[in-house]
């Protein structure tokens, strides 16, 4: 009986520090929200399932992605973000974010340019329409900006991010060409455990 009672009593960590109980540790954002899984969608973070990890030194990382394929088409999205917490409270986390992502799609493309135009003026039979070709498209994206995570409960977090992202499009001959710089927002829904 005395052994069970001593486990429930709070124990001080050092001279002069307040006691820490299991309930206090669970209520602390830095301890309770270390690992999380969920979904993400953004130009810098990628699209798909996500794993987020917060470290004790105010840094964190998020890895996300999804793959899909069939006999005629495929899609892959991968993304990695580094998070640096600037300010944190019980229910709000403000942070800097830097990330990189890859989007790639391979599938049929249909050309409707010759539709309803006679192939031969002597014999007015229309050209075969549409013309199907295979095409690989994609982009590599790099972004940096700010983020805000709301945690209304103890386990669910909703993140809104606004990175400024550089997009490099995949062009013909599998070369990447600069497309532009865009402030495209991202969102994540994460369940922490």
Image (cartoon, helix red, strand yellow):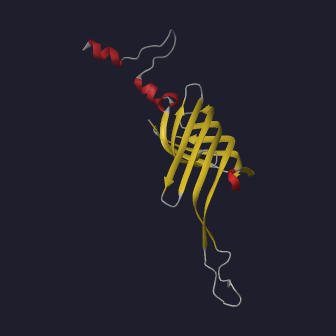
Foreground of the two, 171 or 35: 171
Residue found 74% across the figure and 51% down from its top:
177
What is the number of callouts on the image?
A: 0
Foreground of the two, 55 or 49: 49
Q: Position of residue 116 (x, y in %)?
A: 65, 83
Whether residue 92 sits left or right of residue 178 in the image: it is left
Residue found 51% across the figure and 48% down from its top:
66
Whether residue 173 sits left or right of residue 45 in the image: it is right
Q: Position of residue 126 (x, y in %)?
A: 63, 84
Residue 3 makes an appearance in the image: yes
Q: Position of residue 1 (x, y in %)?
A: 24, 14
- Residue extending farthest to the top is 15
- Residue extending farthest to the left is 1
| Vertical arrangement, residue 172 with respect to residue 56, above or below | below
Q: Position of residue 165 (x, y in %)?
A: 70, 46
Residue found 69% across the figure and 41% down from its top:
145
Whether residue 72 sits left or right of residue 122 in the image: it is left
Residue found 64% across the figure and 42% down from its top:
100
Foreground of the two, 48 or 171: 171
Quarter that holds the C terminus: top left
Q: Quadrant of residue 20?
A: top left
| Vertical arrangement, residue 99 with respect to residue 55, above or below | below
Residue 182 makes an appearance in the image: no
């Amino acid at each position: 009986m005395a052994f069970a009672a001593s486990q429930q009593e709070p124990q001080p960590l050092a001279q002069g520090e307040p006691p820490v109980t299991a309930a206090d540790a669970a209520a602390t954002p830095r301890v309770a929200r270390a690992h999380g899984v969920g979904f993400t969608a953004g130009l810098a973070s990628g699209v798909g399932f996500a794993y987020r990890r917060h470290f004790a030194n105010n840094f964190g990382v998020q890895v996300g992605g999804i793959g899909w394929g069939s006999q005629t088409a495929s899609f892959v999205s991968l993304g990695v973000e580094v998070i640096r917490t600037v300010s944190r409270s019980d229910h709000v986390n403000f942070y800097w974010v830097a990330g990189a992502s890859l989007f790639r799609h391979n599938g049929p493309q249909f050309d409707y340019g010759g539709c309803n135009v006679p192939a031969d003026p002597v014999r007015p039979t229309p050209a075969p329409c549409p013309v199907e070709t295979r095409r690989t498209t994609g982009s590599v994206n790099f972004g940096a900006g700010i983020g805000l995570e709301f945690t209304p409960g103890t386990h669910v977090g909703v993140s809104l991010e606004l990175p400024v992202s550089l997009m490099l499009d995949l062009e013909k001959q599998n070369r990447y060409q600069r497309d532009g710089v865009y402030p495209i927002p991202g969102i994540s829904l994460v369940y922490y455990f």
